[in-house]
Image (cartoon, rainbow, N blue to C red):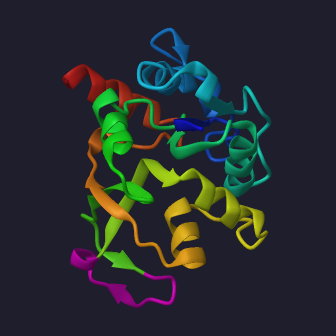
Amino acid sequence: MEKVGAIVLAGGKGTRFHQQKQFVQLWGKELWRHVYDKVCQLIPKKQIIVVGVDVPGGKTRSGSVMNGLNGLKECEKVILLEAARPLVTIEQIQTLIDCEDDSITFVAPCIDTIIKKDKTYLNRNECLRMQTPQAFNYILLKKAYETGKYLDMTDETRVLFEEYGIEPTFVEGGENLYKVTYPKDIAFIENYFEKQ
């Protein structure tokens, strides 16, 4: 069994971006390639699946993750990355590879006031923003998805928590893990990169 595999999620429809953002050109290559090229420096290409390129994307994020898991050779750990976070660093990916826990995620503090739709407030000091990449026990994640209970999840740490009670290990993230969601976000990514 391989030790580590990786799935790059690049199968979204780009509804909020108004086109498939994963294929937008940034510094001479498509967005997903920026993530893929970094992963290739740490994990053999045969152990990397790009959803939306190597295998089709799903109807939901969960469907895309499942397609990636099914396309990947069995391994001990799977790293999940998003094409929409092209500034992820090799060091951040290595941190996930080195951590031995079953559920690992990057997080960042909440800086805005958090209010629920029912107009109740949350204490932002008790909240964190979850970021990718993340890493998981491949077998546990695949078995959880195979139950059919998790068809539309926005985060796999929740899948492992709800199925097995496994709490995620937090790793401090950063502004470089900013997610491209809207067209204006490309300018943010370019400006952030130029300042580094």
Q: Quadrant of the N terminus?
A: top right
Residue 20 among those drawn in magenta: no
Q: Magenta residues, as a range?
A: 116-126
Q: Quadrant of the C terminus?
A: top left
Seen at 37% across and 36% down, the residue is 93
Residue 38 sits above or below residue 168 on the image: above
Residue 110 sits above or below residue 172 on the image: below
Residue 65 in the image: state x and y as whole percent. 67, 49
Seen at 74% across and 73% down, the residue is 149
The single residue placed furthest to the top in the displayed view is 28
Residue 160 in the image: state x and y as whole percent. 54, 68
Number of numbered discs overlaid on the protein picture: 0
Of 8 and 176, the residue lying toward us: 8
Residue 41 position by quadrant: top left
Seen at 63% across and 65% down, the residue is 153
Of 116 and 165, the residue lying toward us: 165
Residue 94 in the image: state x and y as whole percent. 33, 35
Q: Is residue 57 left or right of residue 37?
A: right
Seen at 76% across and 63% down, the residue is 146
The single residue placed furthest to the front in the displayed view is 1
Residue 98 position by quadrant: top left
Q: Is residue 107 left or right of residue 42?
A: left
Q: Is residue 155 left or right of residue 125?
A: right
Residue 86 sits above or below residue 132 on the image: above
Q: Is residue 54 left or right of residue 76?
A: right
Residue 3 in the image: state x and y as whole percent. 50, 38
